[in-house]
Image (tube, rainbow, N blue to C red):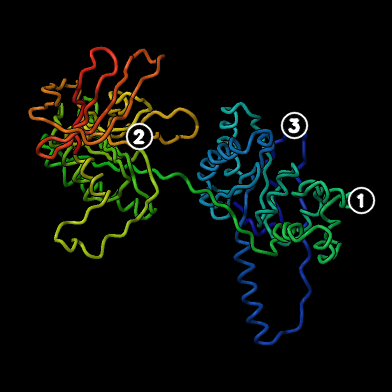
């Protein structure tokens, strides 16, 4: 392969689009004439500038412009560009986003891929196949130059061209139409009235006048294309993914012997999460067997974590109740869901002044997760309110991970009665005895407060009309009782307060 810097400009492999644009090649500019020998300070300053110029010239940005995405909404455009950026990462580690375009740095990949022809052919195949899957036109425009904006303008023009050297960039861009610039209607009208049709016409105008008439953004856009000012990029960051496995040297049947191996894999996972400031709420441990399906252990967390100690404890709890169909030959851990990490400061004093251990919600959540690992998800329940007047239907028992169904886009909180409700509600109300005008439950009880009328709607199909009271037993415990307003009008015990 020839040295890219030995030629002023080389064309990219040409793919003729529907409009049939031509590959443009521009001659190299003549070198500047020799000057007088400068002073030492001037030489040092020139040396610093030359190093900066060399660092800029080392970059070669490959732009891929997709005009067919213009008809799509912004959300779908972002989704498609994210997927295409994943394909472009196969040739470059630096991929940036632009409207209907992706740009990647390829100078560092030229030797690896043996030239830019191979890079383009690889991208043309990957991007073309992806566009066909989306039922979009598989053609696209492309260009490469030492600046991001310069490559983008060349690609927007429909000319598939390559500009290797910065000194050739001004002449290459000068032949482009002003339509490639990102301008509003007023700016385009002014350029048209001034008789400006190409970028070379703009080079002849003073920058101060351009800034007054078109704004600083217009001037900055041109300076970025020429490499005169720094140009920040919005780089693509691929979504995190983690999977680690270990092949055992021999078969194991005792799960306790797998704990050190699983602990090492969890250590790799936690190190991966810490480096990226992430946590996880769902991961799977696969135990592979010979000639049998793998045994999957799903570890779900109510609160995302990256604590190796907590994950190991949950895994040990799963191992205690697990029976495997065959010996294990390999172990694999895979993360199903990543979450942002939210740090919480521990208390400076570990114990309260009274001597009792401090309490936090995270301790309760970790305890419930251990119960789930030991007894199963279906055996750990949570209680939620329901929009029902009748107490028998006013609460729901859900699996701990399950959330109550909320219809509508916005989940509105369910209003809870301000009147007292018992912690323990009997499954079937128990009828109370009346002796000499007094209510008895084992012993005489006294009404403390009430009544609270509860009735069901006529369309509910359940005829309930009750007056609820709070009563007290002789030992001080409180009861929730009601008096029927229909039928035999008996008294019933419905619940116990804490």
Q: Earlier in the sequence, mark 2 or mark 3?
A: 3
Q: Is residue 486 left or right of residue 58?
A: left
Q: Earlier in the sequence, mark 1 or mark 3?
A: 3
Q: Secondary structure at mark 1?
A: helix
Q: Residues within 10 Å of mark 3 (few under 14, many from 20)?
A: few
Q: Residue at label 1?
A: 193
Residue 257 in sight from this viewpoint: yes
- Looking at the picture, how far across and down is residue 496, in whole percent? 18, 32
Q: Residue at label 3?
A: 18
The quarter holding residue 52 reads bottom right
Q: Looking at the picture, tell me which residue is in the foreground, 142 or 458.
A: 458
- Looking at the picture, how far across and down is residue 136, in whole percent? 63, 29
| Residue depicted at 68% across the width and 53% down the height | 149
Q: Residues within 10 Å of mark 1 (few under 14, many from 20)?
A: few
How far apart, in angstroms, are the residues tagged by discs 2 and 3?
A: 69 Å
Q: Residue at label 2?
A: 417
| Residue depicted at 78% across the width and 65% down the height | 30
């Amino acid at each position: 392969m020839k040295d890219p810097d030995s030629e002023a400009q080389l064309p990219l492999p040409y793919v003729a689009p529907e409009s049939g644009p031509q590959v443009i090649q521009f001659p190299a500019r003549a070198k500047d004439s020799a000057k007088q020998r400068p002073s030492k300070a001037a030489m040092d300053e020139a040396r610093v500038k030359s190093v900066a110029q060399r660092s800029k010239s080392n970059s070669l940005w490959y732009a891929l412009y997709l005009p067919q995405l213009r008809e799509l909404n912004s959300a779908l455009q972002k989704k498609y560009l994210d997927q295409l950026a994943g394909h472009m990462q196969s040739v470059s580690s630096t991929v940036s986003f632009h409207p209907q375009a992706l740009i990647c740095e390829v100078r560092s990949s030229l030797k690896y891929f043996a030239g830019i022809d191979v890079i383009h052919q690889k991208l043309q195949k990957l991007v073309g196949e992806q566009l066909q899957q989306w039922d979009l036109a598989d053609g696209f425009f492309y260009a490469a130059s030492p600046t991001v904006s310069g490559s983008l303008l060349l690609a927007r023009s429909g000319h598939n061209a390559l500009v290797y050297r910065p000194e050739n960039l001004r002449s290459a861009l000068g032949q482009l139409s002003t339509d490639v610039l990102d301008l509003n209607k007023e700016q385009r009208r002014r350029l048209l009235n001034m008789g400006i049709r190409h970028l070379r016409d703009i080079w002849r105008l003073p920058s101060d006048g351009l800034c007054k008439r078109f704004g600083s953004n217009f001037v900055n856009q041109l300076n970025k294309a020429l490499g005169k000012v720094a140009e920040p990029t919005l780089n693509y960051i691929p979504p995190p993914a983690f999977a680690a496995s270990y092949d055992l040297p021999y078969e194991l049947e005792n799960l306790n012997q797998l704990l050190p191996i699983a602990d090492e894999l969890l250590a790799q996972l936690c190190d991966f999460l810490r480096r990226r400031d992430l946590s996880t709420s769902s991961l799977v441990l696969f135990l592979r067997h010979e000639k049998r399906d793998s045994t999957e252990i799903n570890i779900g967390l109510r609160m995302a974590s990256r604590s190796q100690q907590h994950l190991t404890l949950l895994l040990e709890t799963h191992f205690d109740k697990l029976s495997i169909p065959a010996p294990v030959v390999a172990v694999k851990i895979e993360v199903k869901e990543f979450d942002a990490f939210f740090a919480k400061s521990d208390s400076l004093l570990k114990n309260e002044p009274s001597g009792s251990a401090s309490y936090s919600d995270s301790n309760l959540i970790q305890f419930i997760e251990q119960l789930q690992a030991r007894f199963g998800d279906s055996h750990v329940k949570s209680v939620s309110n329901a929009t029902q007047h009748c107490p028998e239907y006013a609460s729901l028992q859900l699996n701990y991970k399950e959330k109550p169904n909320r219809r509508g886009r916005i989940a509105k909180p369910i209003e809870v009665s301000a009147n007292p409700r018992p912690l323990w509600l009997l499954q079937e109300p128990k009828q109370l005895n009346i002796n000499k005008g007094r209510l008895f439950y084992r012993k005489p009880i006294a009404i403390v407060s009430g009544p609270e009328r509860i009735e069901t709607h006529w369309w509910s199909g359940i005829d309930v009309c009750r007056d609820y009271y709070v009563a007290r037993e002789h030992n001080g415990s409180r009861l929730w009782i009601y008096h029927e307003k229909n039928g035999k009008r008996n008294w019933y015990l419905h619940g116990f307060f804490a």
